[in-house]
């Protein structure tokens, strides 16, 4: 946190390389979150990149009442949700993987285990794709990124009570979508 | 208590986000309800499944690309003025050293210098010329006022003195103050108020409504009778008054043939094709603005022709002076006129006081031409219009060179643009415009509020 503040101060003083270090620090974490919100690796990359650009351009308006990454996430998640509303996914994570050979990072060595995990991931992604943007964003922030309710409320600009109820509804819908998978587990 | 499935406390319990009281409530529910325990298990499994999803990582470092795009976006948003982010003296200096800031500052300094020189020149030339420039009835009153003032030493109270210092009605001044209050720092308003207060002490020879250089006291000519004549409407607001060889009329004389003045000025030469219409008598009478050298009258359309020439021949910064009625100010007629011609301005390029409104705009010559002709076509609102190149004009050539250099900079994209990004497409359009800049006519509009009733 203090490191972020120092890098922000250096950036505002004219050292843009300091902002480069902020990009390096948060790009993967933000990208992983946004991929699950957009369901599309190319869109996610665009969104993350644009979010950093917007953050740089508007850095002097960052009020520091919250953490930098919360502010950054707010920019990125809002952009991702807007993009999803305008444009339906044309390239799913699965499709991108098939087309580009890009493999998400995994740790499994056993081919059978890997196949099972791949199938599970495919099911989960399909279920996530069927959620609407608001529900998807809140569940990704909680389950994928591990944000607390307060941080989610800041990022999505919602009251904490709304976060709680929206998260619960999102979980119920996802549970319904994945009922069979969850039973098997 | 809610239906178990709908009970969002279960989710919050799972996440450890409950207060002690709510947590106790959920634990009671779990102890009593098999359905609640089952739902909690499902939600827990769902969470672990989601958290076990593979992590996605970018296969490249975005930092360099982000910084490049940020630079481009700054340029695209403000093609001629990149506001560096940051605080401190270094960032502040960078802001002041942008080409636009330098150009605007040099123009302002040039106008200020011209004001100083011209006002001193007017003083030394004496009162005769000033009185001759005023409308006949004011001239008579002024002469009486000057005489009375010299004889009794209380010229400020003389009726002639007052009549020569028309000021906007209080209600209009309040409106103007409202505009100033809304858009500009209190400092500008304070300056106008101070100048107004000084006006109430005319024995010190201070101009009304003037700011900066023009607001200085006339202590350099305390004994000269002409110091009283400074209260002539032409001086009220300390407008930049062009010297004889800088007026639009003289410029037109050199470019389009001799011209003539109105009112007390000399009779028109027969070979004044451009200004001929301007000097024609009108049944509705001539409006005051002789001090600018180039005069319009109600219903006059002749100015269009001269303005056409001015715009096309000067090609750089134009100085457009315009006397506006208080009602026009109230109606924001000038703003509406600019907007109707799609001429926009930035807040920082406009300075307003209660009596003066100075606006710097950049637009195509056609837009400026149309705007000026529309000003001249509304004599009830815009009492007079004059056009001349501004002193210390910014070189259009320099501006074009600046744009071209920016264009070259932009024409070497370091990044591959991705399809499907509307923002990048927009940026591309703006960069194309930078590469092929449209010649803009830089124009400084100087508006002065004039109360017609006192003319």
Image (cartoon, rainbow, N blue to C red):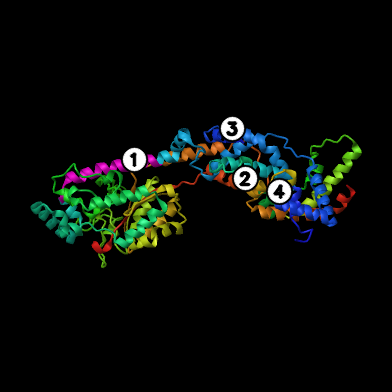
Q: Which of the chains bears the disc numbered 3?
A: A
Q: Where residue B109 is drawn, which disc sits there? A: 1
Give B397 or A121, whichever is nearer the viewer. Answer: A121
Quadrant containing the N terminus of chain A is top right
How many residues crowd around disc 2 within 10 Å: few (fewer than 14), some, or many (20 or more)? Answer: some
| Circle number at residue A18 | 3
Alpha carbon distance from label 4 to label 3: 35 Å
Identity of the residue drawn at 87% across and 50% down: A181
Q: Secondary structure at mark 2?
A: helix
First along the sequence among labels 1 and 2: 1
Whether labels 4 and 1 belong to a single chain: the reply is yes
Residue depth check, mark 1 versus mark 3: number of the one nearer the observer: 3
Dot 4 or dot 1, earlier in sequence: 4
Picture quadrant of residue B170: bottom left
Q: Nearer the viewer, mark 2 or mark 3?
A: 3
At x 53%, y 41%, the residue is: A60
Please say if B398 is above or below B147. Answer: above
The numbered mark at residue B263 is: none
- Say yes or no: labels 1 and 3 on the same chain: no
B445, B195: nearer the viewer:
B195
Looking at the image, tell me whether mark 2 or mark 4 is earlier in sequence order. 4
Q: Which residue is labeled 4 in the image?
A: B17
Q: Respond whether the residues carrying marks 4 and 3 are from the same subunit.
A: no
Q: Are marks 1 and 2 on the same chain?
A: yes
Residue bearing the label numbered 2: B424
Say whether marks 2 and 4 touch (CB < 8 Å): no
Left or right, residue B19 beside residue A55? right
């Amino acid at each position: 946190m203090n490191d972020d503040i120092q890098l922000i101060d250096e950036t505002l003083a004219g050292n843009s390389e300091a902002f480069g270090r902020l990009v390096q620090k948060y790009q993967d974490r933000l990208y992983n979150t946004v991929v699950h919100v957009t369901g599309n690796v190319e869109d996610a990359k665009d969104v993350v990149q644009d979010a950093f650009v917007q953050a740089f351009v508007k850095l002097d308006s960052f009020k520091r009442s919250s953490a930098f990454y919360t502010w950054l996430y707010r920019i990125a998640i809002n952009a991702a949700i807007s993009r999803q509303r305008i444009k339906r996914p044309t390239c799913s994570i699965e499709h991108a993987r098939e087309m580009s050979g890009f493999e998400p990072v995994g740790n499994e060595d056993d081919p059978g285990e890997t196949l099972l995990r791949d199938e599970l991931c495919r099911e989960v992604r399909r279920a996530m794709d069927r959620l609407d943007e608001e529900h998807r964003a809140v569940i990704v922030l909680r389950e994928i990124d591990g944000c607390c309710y307060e941080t989610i409320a800041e990022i999505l600009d919602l009251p904490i009570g709304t976060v709680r109820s929206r998260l619960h509804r999102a979980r119920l819908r996802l549970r319904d979508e994945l009922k069979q998978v969850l039973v098997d587990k | 208590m809610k239906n178990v499935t709908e009970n969002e406390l279960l989710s919050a319990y799972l996440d450890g986000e409950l207060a002690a009281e709510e947590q106790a409530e959920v634990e009671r529910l779990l102890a009593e309800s098999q359905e609640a325990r089952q739902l909690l298990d499902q939600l827990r499994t769902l969470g672990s499944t989601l958290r076990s999803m593979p992590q996605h990582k970018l296969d490249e470092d975005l930092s360099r690309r982000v910084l490049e795009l940020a630079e481009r976006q700054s340029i695209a948003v403000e093609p001629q003025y990149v506001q560096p982010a940051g605080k401190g003296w270094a960032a502040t200096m960078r802001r002041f050293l942008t080409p636009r800031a330098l150009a605007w500052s040099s123009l302002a300094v040039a106008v200020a210098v011209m004001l100083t020189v011209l006002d001193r020149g007017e003083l030394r030339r004496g009162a005769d010329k000033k009185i001759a420039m005023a409308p006949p009835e004011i001239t008579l009153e002024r002469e009486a006022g000057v005489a009375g003032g010299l004889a009794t030493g209380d010229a400020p109270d003389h009726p002639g003195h007052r009549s020569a210092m028309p000021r906007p009605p209080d209600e209009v001044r309040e409106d103007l103050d409202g505009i100033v209050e809304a858009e500009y720092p209190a400092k500008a308003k304070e300056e106008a108020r101070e100048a107004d207060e000084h006006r109430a002490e005319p024995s010190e020879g201070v101009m009304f409504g003037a700011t900066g250089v023009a607001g200085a006291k006339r202590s350099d000519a305390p004994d000269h009778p002409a110091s009283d004549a400074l209260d002539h409407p032409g001086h009220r607001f300390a407008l930049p008054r062009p010297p004889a060889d800088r007026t639009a009329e003289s410029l037109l004389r050199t470019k389009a043939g001799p011209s003539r003045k109105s009112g007390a000025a000399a009779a028109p030469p027969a070979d004044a094709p451009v200004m001929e219409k301007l000097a024609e008598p009108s049944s509705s009478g001539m409006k005051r603005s002789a001090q600018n050298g180039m005069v319009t009258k109600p219903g006059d359309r002749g100015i269009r022709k001269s303005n056409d020439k001015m715009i096309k021949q000067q090609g750089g910064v134009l100085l457009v002076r315009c006397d506006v009625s208080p009602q026009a100010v109230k109606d924001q007629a000038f703003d509406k006129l600019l907007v109707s011609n799609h001429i926009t301005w930035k807040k920082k390029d406009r300075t307003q006081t209660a009596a003066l409104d100075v606006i710097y705009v950049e637009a195509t010559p056609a837009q400026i031409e149309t705007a000026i002709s529309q000003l001249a076509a509304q004599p009830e609102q815009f009492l007079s219009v004059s056009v001349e190149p501004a002193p210390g004009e910014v070189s259009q050539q320099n501006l074009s060179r600046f744009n071209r250099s920016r264009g070259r900079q932009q024409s070497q994209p370091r990044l591959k643009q991705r399809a499907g990004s509307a923002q990048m497409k927009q940026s591309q359009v703006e960069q194309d415009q930078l590469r092929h800049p449209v010649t803009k006519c830089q124009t400084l509009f100087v508006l002065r509020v004039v109360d017609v009733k006192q003319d």
